[in-house]
Amino acid sequence: MAAPALTSRAGSVNSLGNSPTATPSSTNNNNKIMPSYSELDFRSGARIEDLNRLILEFSKHDQREYDDQRALEIHTAKDFIFSMLGMVQKLDQKLPVANEYLLLSGGVREGVVDMDLDELSVYARGTDYDMDFTLLVPALKLHDRNQPVTLDMRHSALCHSWLSLRLFDEGTINKWKDCCTVVDHINGATNYFFSPTLVADWFYESISVVLVEIQKKPQRGMPRVEKVERNGTIISVILGVGSSRMLYDIMPVVSFKGWPAVAQSWLMENHFWDGKITEEEVISGFYLVPACSHKGRKENEWRLSFARSEVQLKKCISASLMQAYQACKAIIIKLLSRPKAISPYHLRSMMLWACDRLPATYLSQEDFSAHFLLGLIDDLQNCLVNKMCPNYFIPQCNMLEHLSDEMAMLHARKLSSVRSDPAEHLRTTIEHAKAANRLTLELHWRGSASNLPSPQSDAGGEHQPDDRLAKKLQQLVTENPGKSISVFINPDDVTRPHFRIDDKFF
């Protein structure tokens, strides 16, 4: 709609008139004081300060408060998962004895790893769980190479690869033959390709066997296994500990030290993290995760994941940008969840590209969360209209290449509605966060009223083993307020915990 014509009362061209940036001292030619306007979003007319306030309110409700009890429950659940994996390793010795897991805050549905969400069951915070984590468990490790890692991408789309076991020793091949597809060459040689689907089959069956054994001999303070579900190549486990429910999305991966040759050119570019963290921290390793391209063979194709690097890059992102990202992610998860053409990982990639594109001084502004939120929505909408979302580490890989024109426009129109009224969508996400917190609180009160077993509870009884782990950890939490406390379990002896407070071991 065209703007109304200005009358002579609007003042000369040098007058600020009705400009949104006018100050209280702005006057027209008749020396009348004109009203002052807050900074406005041109598209929606929303006041920037109102959007900032809503983003801050969402962050307050979205954050998890960890008191001593909750911290103990988190560590108890982690202890249980690590002990379970130690028992999985002992079943058939397939997993490495000395393994290095990557534990990420947030489930796969939150976009912490680039995985396809179509095969995942829908879980909701508050209704199904209170906290969620993603755990990457290396089934194979290749950590003895210093040069760039060259993968077999002849049969795959960009960002994907088959994995031949020729890279590994004879013992490894013999252990994993039953989880491979076999290709016979003309020269008579046999090549075993590590299969993500077969590995996931084995992993789910092994975890199920171990959990049955664990539950045959329940111990006081042991988490309740509320759900074990296969979601494609991911095993989702929901544990109840005290009054908390924790979702672990566990996936078998292949772990590499070094950097893939296909992403070598990315290192030659300038990036926002230059000078903040070292290149060695960023390129310390990568993974193959069990996901294939849209035209690839599920039984053979793995996807490159830079989750380890992303953990390091997150340290260099300002708090205000992270707040905007979390709020935007909450909006699109609700808005674009059906059909699942867009995942939160696409938004994460857009944020990283924005960090490279925009000055650090701009991105570090504390009161610019609203600008960042609107910019992320604009960027994502632009990606949909153009069906172009480059992978941050391998820019030649377009993560939206498979999207149909109809699907892209459907999602772009949905985002357009958000951009036209961001305040209303923020209010909706705040209400969802409040509702989730209420459900969690209600469960906590019901659990307290019902005396649900907790890591701290004293059930008594002559046949109940002494819960020394929980008592020791509670003592450490009480005596070391504000310090980082971790529990490490030796896979060869899961009965002996090792505590670390900051950099000291006990």
Image (cartoon, rainbow, N blue to C red):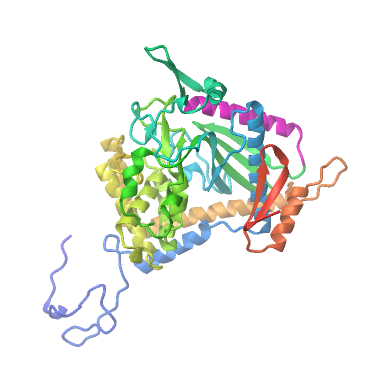
Relative to 295, is 27 above or below? below
Q: Which residue is more in the foreground, 245 or 498?
A: 498
Q: Is residue 4 left or right of residue 169?
A: left
Residue 89, position as x, y percentages in the image: 63, 32
Residue 177, position as x, y percentages in the image: 53, 20
Q: Quadrant of residue 240?
A: top right
Q: Quadrant of residue 374?
A: bottom left
Relative to 371, is 94 above or below? above
Residues shaded magenta: 195-219
Q: Is residue 482 left or right of residue 121?
A: right
> What is the count of numbered marks?
0
Q: Which residue is more in the foreground, 116 or 1?
A: 116
Relative to 183, is 361 above or below? below
User: Which of the image's four quarters has the N terminus?
Assistant: bottom left
Q: Quadrant of residue 152?
A: top left
Q: Is residue 134 left or right of residue 411?
A: right
Residue 85 located within the stretch drawn in magenta: no
Q: Residue at x 41, y 42 (%)?
A: 259
